[in-house]
Image: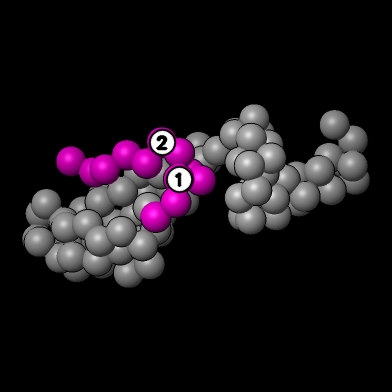
Amino acid sequence: MPELVEDYFHPGWRTRSVECAACEWRGDSRGMTLEPHEDMSEYLCPRCEDIMLVVRHPDLAQVRAAAAAGHPEAVEQLALLEEYTRRHGG
């Protein structure tokens, strides 16, 4: 069963080593295959393609809260979202 990462901005989920339940490959998200979807991303085992991680994409409120807390990636994402909104009216 894949591990669910509810908080995209939670530190360490990208670098924490996990083991594939199907083939016992071990590694972190950087060694997995990324399958992005609209509301979440799946990280697949590079050996057997079993889903190892499911990461929920943050909504605007979560991005704002993480940016306010000083999370560098959230600060970047918020700036991009605000620029998009300014350009496209919204």
Find disc 2 in the rendering and name its residue. Answer: 6
Position of 58 with respect to 5 (left or right) is right
Magenta highlight range: 1-12
Residue 10's tag is 1
Q: In what element is the residue under mark 1?
A: loop
Residue at the (24%, 43%) spot, across then down: 2
The reply to whether dot 1 and dot 2 touch (C-beta < 8 Å) is: yes
Q: How many marks?
A: 2
Amino acid on which the number 2 mark rests in the picture: Glu
Q: CA distance from mark 1 to mark 2?
A: 8 Å
Residue at (16% x, 58% y) in the render: 19
**Is residue 49 visible in this depiction of the protein?**
no
Which residue occupies the foreground of this view, 78 or 87? 78
Q: Quadrant of the N terminus?
A: top left
Judging depth in this view, the residue of 64 and 56 nearest the camera is 64
Q: Please tell me the numbered disc located at residue 77.
A: none
